[in-house]
Image (tube, helix red, strand yellow):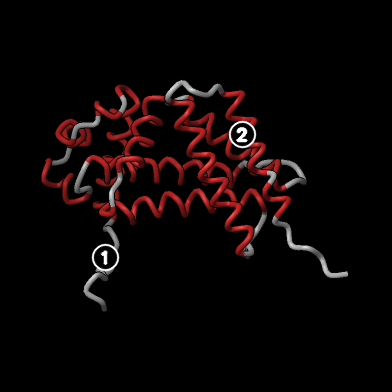
């Protein structure tokens, strides 16, 4: 093990997982009511019914907590999409439809969306594992919509560009610099990269 490597955390017990779920629910509730500024660690602890010290053992900072909240929200979206996958034969259209469904889910909770996106923007290297998990879930959502289990390097590159565009579109919408219609156009445009990266069939 290198000096930088950290041992894997032991799996949470059922009681610990239930406590973590309460914390994430409290974070989402507070953010949904008042955005980024409303998520104060002491208030989260009170809302979740845990000691402040316990909260900090699960999440070392407000940024860790809100990025984990976004991870949890995306995981919920991923589960919902598994149950109700996008229709259509065209992978690009399925991905665009999927991302717009995710966008509309965030649109219903603009204060929560703003809090989570701000946390991602403020995250430093200490939050890298949580940020990486958010990216992995987003990638999985896109690949599922594409119907791909073994993407090529070119396809993975296209997925990363799509992720960046979706994130940027979310930021510009939250800041009032883009309409929903413009977001839909931008998402549809970038998803056409999927067609460009399709492997060519051998003659």
**Residue 160 location (% of width, % of height):** 54, 51
Describe residue 86's horizontal placement relative to residue 13 as left or right. Answer: right
Describe residue 99's horizontal placement relative to residue 168 as left or right. Answer: right
State which quarter of the image contains the C terminus.
Answer: bottom right
Q: Which residue is rendered at x = 47% and y = 54% of the image?
A: 136
Secondary element under disc 2, as helix, strand or loop, is helix
**Residue 30 location (% of width, % of height):** 28, 28
**Residue 171 location (% of width, % of height):** 45, 32
Mark 1 and mark 2 lie on one chain; the one further toward the N terminus is 1
State whether residue 145 is above or below residue 33.
below
Q: Which mark is residue 186?
A: 2
**Residue 7 location (% of width, % of height):** 25, 70
Describe residue 92's horizontal placement relative to residue 177 as left or right. Answer: right
Describe residue 171's horizontal placement relative to residue 130 as left or right. Answer: right
State whether residue 25 is above or below residue 18.
above
Classed neighbour count for the residue bearing mark 1: other residues with Cα under 10 Å, few (<14), some (14–19), many (≥20): few
- Closer to the eye: label 1 or 2: 2
Secondary element under disc 1, as helix, strand or loop, is loop
Q: Which mark is residue 10?
A: 1
Q: Quadrant of residue 201?
A: bottom right
């Amino acid at each position: 093990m290198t000096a930088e490597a950290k041992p894997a955390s032991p799996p949470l017990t059922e009681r610990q997982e239930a406590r973590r779920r309460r914390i994430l629910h409290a974070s989402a509730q507070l953010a949904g009511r008042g955005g980024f500024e409303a998520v104060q660690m002491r208030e989260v602890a009170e809302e979740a019914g845990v000691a402040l010290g316990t909260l900090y053992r699960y999440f070392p900072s407000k940024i860790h907590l809100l990025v984990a909240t976004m991870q949890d929200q995306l995981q919920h979206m991923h589960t919902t999409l598994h149950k109700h996958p996008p229709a259509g034969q065209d992978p690009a259209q399925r991905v665009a439809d999927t991302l717009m469904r995710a966008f509309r889910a965030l649109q219903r909770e603009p204060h929560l969306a703003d809090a989570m996106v701000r946390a991602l923007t403020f995250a430093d290297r200490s939050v890298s594992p949580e940020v990486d998990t958010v990216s992995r879930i987003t990638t999985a959502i896109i690949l599922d919509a594409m119907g791909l289990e073994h993407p090529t390097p070119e396809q993975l590159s296209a997925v990363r560009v799509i992720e960046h565009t979706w994130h940027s579109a979310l930021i510009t919408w939250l800041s009032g610099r883009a309409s929903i219609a413009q977001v839909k156009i931008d998402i549809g445009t970038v998803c056409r990269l999927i067609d460009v990266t399709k492997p060519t069939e051998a003659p």
